[in-house]
Amino acid sequence: MIDSKIEAYIDAHSTKVDNVLNEIYRQTHLTQMYPRMISGPLQGKFLEMICAMLQPKKVLEIGTFTAYSTISMARGLSRESHIITFENNEELEDMIHDNLNKAGVAQQVELIIGDAIALIPQLANKFDLVFIDADKINYPRYFEMVLEKLNPGGFILADNVLWSGKVADPAITDEETRAIRQFNAMARDNKQTEQIILPLRDGISLIRKISYD
Ligand SMILES: C[S@@+](CC[C@H](N)C(=O)[O-])C[C@H]1O[C@@H](n2cnc3c(N)ncnc32)[C@H](O)[C@@H]1O
C-alpha cells in the first residue's frame, strides 16, 4: 500500500534482518504456494521491536506459516519468555521445526499443529501478547477467544486489518472483508480494550486490554 519509492527508502534506512530470516524468506518463496502470507523484513522487525519494548513473558501466535513472525518475535524476547504458536497445516510442521532450530529459538517456542479455534479455549495459560495472523473469516472469534486469555495490560496485534484497503470500500462485501470489518468494530467498541490501526503493510491493529470488565 505504500508508494514503492517510500518503501525502498524505508528499507534502506531500517536495520536489516539476519541471514536466517533472509533464508526463510527465500525458501518460503521457493516452496510455498502463497508466499505473500509471510510477514517479511519490515513487519518482522516491527514485531521484534514490539517484543523488545513490551518484554512479554508469554506470547500466543495464531498462524505460524514458515515461522518468520515467530522467529522475529523471539528475537526481541528475553530467554525466559515463551511463545505458543498455532498452525493447522501439518505439511508445514517439519519446515517450522527446522526454521526454529536454525534460528536458535526452538527451546522458547512450542508449536501446536491443529485448529486454533478448537484448541485455544483449552489453553491453561494467560498471555501478555497475542499475534493474530490466521484465517480472516475467524478474526471476530479470535478476538473474543484471545481477550479471555489476555492478562490486563496485555496487547493483541492483528495483521491484515486493512485488507488491501477493502475494509474502507463499502461496495466490497465478500466474507473475509466483512469479517475483518467486524473484528475492527469489535475492538473499537469493546469496553475492555483500546486500539489503533497502524497503516504498516496491510494494516496492523495494536489493541490493549485495559481492564477485566
Ligand atoms: C498469513 S499466514 C501466517 C504468516 C506468519 N504469521 C508470518 O508472519 O510469516 C496464516 C497461517 O495461518 C494458518 N491457519 C489458518 N487457519 C488456521 C487455524 N484455524 N488454526 C491454525 N492455523 C491456521 C495457515 O495455514 C497459514 O499458514
Image: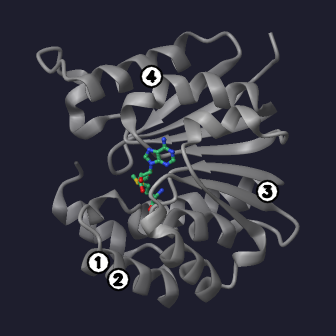
Q: For the residues marked 1 and 2, what is the alpha-carbon distance in whole angstroms?
A: 6 Å
Name the residue carrying label 2.
27
Circle 1 SS class: helix
Colour scheme of the picture: one colour
Given contact means CB atoms under 8 Å apart, are the residues at marks 4 and 2 in contact?
A: no
Q: Is residue 195 above or below residue 26?
A: above
Q: Where is residue 6 in the image (x, y as percent from the top left)?
A: 24, 61
Of residues 60 and 207, the one drawn nearer to the viewer in this rendering: 60
Mark 3 lies within 8 Å of ligand 1 (Cβ measured): no
Neighbours of disc 3 within 10 Å: few (<14), some (14-19), many (20+): some
Name the residue carrying label 1.
31
Q: For the residues marked 4 and 3, what is the alpha-carbon distance in whole angstroms?
A: 25 Å
Given contact means CB atoms under 8 Å apart, are the residues at marks 1 and 3 in contact?
A: no
Name the residue carrying label 3.
55
Name the residue carrying label 4.
184
Q: Which of marks 4 and 2 is nearer the N terminus?
A: 2
Circle 2 SS class: helix
Q: In which quarter of the image is residue 156?
A: top right
Report the residue that reaches farthest toward the right. 80
Q: In which quarter of the image is residue 155?
A: top right
Q: In front: mark 2 or mark 3?
A: 2
Q: In which quarter of the image is residue 26?
A: bottom left
Q: In front: mark 1 or mark 3?
A: 1
Circle 3 SS class: loop
Tell me the amino acid under the disc marked 2.
Gln
Q: For the residues marked 1 and 3, what is the alpha-carbon distance in whole angstroms?
A: 33 Å
